[in-house]
Amino acid sequence: MNRRNFIGFGVLAMAALPAALSAFSSIDFRATKPATWKAKTVQDAIKALYGDIKPENKGVTVKAPKVASNGGAVPVTIKSDIPAKTVAFFQDMDPESAVTVWNVPDVGIVDYFLKIKLKATDANGGNGELTAIVEGKDGKFYVGKTKLQVAKGGCEG
């Protein structure tokens, strides 16, 4: 391929990129579902985001350490093989329960890793639960949960 053809194809690809990216329609959940981000409980946040749903307890895995020695950076992994539209993540240890919501593109894989900040809320450390909700392309909802404890003391809580 000569240089002119290469540059021409490059310009064509750059022109097509915005159209391709706009095909992944995404919803701004902060703007469209503001009550989700103010909810104080996981159930209230889920209801504000998705309405009254009854998620099935299968197909979603949430992993975190059993005891997090540093509440400032708790590693969390969320995985699912379910073809998904959205994935929402919640916790019950901080004042607002909603952590994040992802739009999953048509070819997307639900295999997310993030670090979150959680507080130890009492003298014995903080015990809590992490919850992920997958909205399937089949119109059903699926849930995965895990429990954890955040150690109390020093800069760890």
Image (cartoon, grey):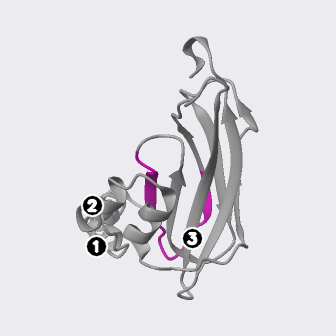
Residue 36 figure quarter:
bottom left
Residue 118 in sight = yes
Residue tagged 2: 34
The vertical placement of 118 against 155, above or below, is: below
The vertical placement of 126 against 156, above or below, is: below
Residue tagged 3: 134
Q: 72 or 25, which is in the foreground? A: 72
The vertical placement of 146 against 122, above or below, is: below
Screen quadrant of the C terminus: top right
Whether 95 is among the magenta residues is: no
Residue with the most extreme bottom position: 138
Screen quadrant of the N terminus: bottom left
Which of the two discs, 3 and 1, labels the residue nearer the N terminus? Answer: 1
Disc tally is 3
The residue that appears at 70% across and 52% down in the rendered structure is 146
The vertical placement of 141 against 45, above or below, is: below
**Badge 1 density bin: few <14, some 14–19, many ≥20, Cα 10 Å:** few
Q: CA distance from mark 1 to mark 2?
A: 29 Å
Residue tagged 1: 19
Q: Position of residue 137 (x, y in %)?
A: 54, 84
Which of the two discs, 1 and 2, labels the residue nearer the N terminus? Answer: 1
Q: Position of residue 27 (x, y in %)?
A: 32, 69
Q: Position of residue 124 (x, y in %)?
A: 67, 26
* Mark 3 element type: strand
**Badge 3 density bin: few <14, some 14–19, many ≥20, Cα 10 Å:** many
**Amino acid of disc 1:** Ala
Q: Point out the stretch of residues depicted in magenta.
A: 96-112
* Mark 1 element type: helix
